[in-house]
Amino acid sequence: MTESAIPQPPDTYPEGTLGHSLAQRRIVRFDPGHACLEYEVLHAMCHSGGVAQGGFVAGWIDAAMAHAVMAKYGFDRVPISLELKVSYFAPANPGRVLAEAWLEKAGGRTVFAEGRLTTLDGKVLAKASSTISLIDAAKVAAKMV
């Protein structure tokens, strides 16, 4: 599959899916090795007077990194996080945020990605880096049976 032939996934997902659970609102960018997704920080995701729980922040950036991988390699290989490091700089409060990610280096089966979560006006809330393994989708599907 060529990079230009990779279809963009849907902007939103049905109830019961990961995209829905993470309150994904739209895909802003889906280019080979680069992705940007918009999320809604819901009150149900917050603690301590309106601060998004850190796991959601990590999940949003992690999902953007997976989208960056899929935008480059397609859907025949599943991105599996081997390691994820997140640094938090400011609280994510209810409203819209952007999770942007890009591939720093890619080998045969291992990818190094970076990403960040920002407000819509560009304030950096968190940054992350990840080591990702690319697994054949057929092998993953076979183990799910």
Image (tube, grey):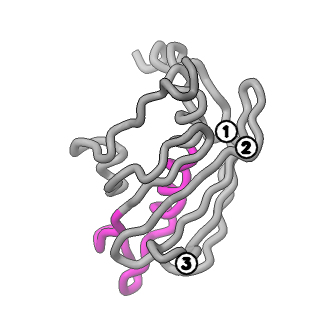
**Residue sitting at 53 percent across and 74 percent down?**
122
**Residue sitting at 64 percent across and 28 percent down?**
134
Q: Label 1, on which residue?
A: 132
Mark 1 lies on a secondary structure that is strand
In terms of image quadrants, where is residue 136? top right
**Of the residues tagged 2 and 3, which is closer to the observer?**
3
**Where residue 123 is drawn, which disc sits there?**
3
Mark 3 lies on a secondary structure that is loop
- How many angstroms separate mark 1 from mark 2 (CA)? 6 Å
Q: Amino acid at mark 2?
A: Phe
Q: Earlier in the sequence, mark 1 or mark 3?
A: 3
- How many angstroms separate mark 1 from mark 3 (CA)? 26 Å
Q: Label 2, on which residue?
A: 112
Q: Residues within 10 Å of mark 2 (few under 14, many from 20)?
A: some
Query: Is label 1 in contact with label 2 (beta carbons under 8 Å)?
Result: yes
Q: Is residue 97 above or below residue 51?
A: above
Magenta highlight range: 40-65
Q: Is residue 3 above or below residue 126?
A: above
Q: x and y percent of residue 88 in the render?
A: 61, 73
Q: Earlier in the sequence, mark 2 or mark 3?
A: 2
